[in-house]
Image (cartoon, rainbow, N blue to C red):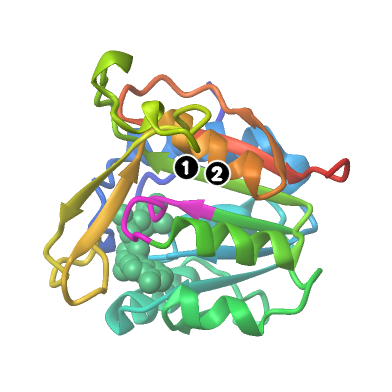
Amino acid sequence: MKLSVDYRGTPFLETSRVYATVDRLNYVCEMLLTRNLHAIRDKNILDIASHDGTYSYACLQLGAKYVVGVEPRSHLVHDAIENLTSLGHKTSEFTFIEDDIFNYLPAIEPGQFDTILCFGFFYHTTRQTELLAQIHRIKPKYFILSTRIENLKLPRSKLQGINRWECRETAGFMAFYYENPRQDMATIEPTGLTGTPSKSLVEALLKDHGFKFKQLSWNRADGVSYLAEIDTRI
Ligand SMILES: C[S@@+](CC[C@H](N)C(=O)[O-])C[C@H]1O[C@@H](n2cnc3c(N)ncnc32)[C@H](O)[C@@H]1O
């Protein structure tokens, strides 16, 4: 298969702390970005949790107008700038901001970004609803979400909440985990507490925050990806 972005020989293979093999990065890029070129080419893009610039780089290779990456770990911000520069991109094409995305988003004006990427972050926080509310307020044309999901299956008969008079139906589950915040791929919250939502919960949250979406075909049991747009009917 001819790839529009090929990670062979790129520095991300060294600097990423997120299982960065050539095959995985090429596959993710193909499925989530290259096949959604209309959401990338000539667009202003926000890359949430940009890590070492892995997917910001892909966006520029695919013709994005400008990319802003937000990442709280300073050495990863440094790596991202070095990586993109060493691969021939000019600093006039991108900015990497060292910040917590929850500090950054409230200052963004609606329409400032055409496309927002959220790859590998939705399960490193417990603030999913706040994140989606901010993204909806900013009103990008496209929101591409890729997240790990919780696959726990609970039989309906075990659900206590469903019998409460005010509870209509179950939206899904969130499993809470403690991560080690000293690790580069983890939450920055000192307690380490994070929440991994079930697939049905991700979809309920997207819908309730005013997105219409389609699942991007990606064969993985532990994760799911979506191309979402603001639902103007809501
Ligand atoms: C699993 S990595 C995913 C990195 C990259 N987006 C990818 O898909 O390869 C999670 C990233 O989220 C970053 N992160 C953690 N808490 C954050 C926060 N509050 N705001 C922005 N980024 C955060 C971490 O530093 C790390 O780079």
The stretch of residues the image draws in magenta is 118-126
Q: Earlier in the sequence, mark 2 or mark 1?
A: 1
- Residue kind at label 2, given as amino acid type: Leu
Q: Which residue is identified by label 2?
A: 205
Please tell me whether the stretch drawn in magenta is mainly helix, strand or loop: loop
Mark 1 residue CB less than 8 A from any atom of ligand 1: yes
Foreground residue among 234 and 40: 234
Residue drawn at point x = 53 percent, y = 45 percent? 145
Foreground residue among 179 and 160: 160
Which residue of the protein is positioned furthest toward the front in this rendering? 165
Q: Which mark is residue 146?
A: 1
Residue 20, position in %: x, y? Answer: 28, 47
* In the image: residue 137, left or right of residue 186: right
Foreground residue among 58 and 127: 127
Q: Is residue 207 magenta?
A: no
Residue drawn at point x = 80 percent, y = 57 percent? 42
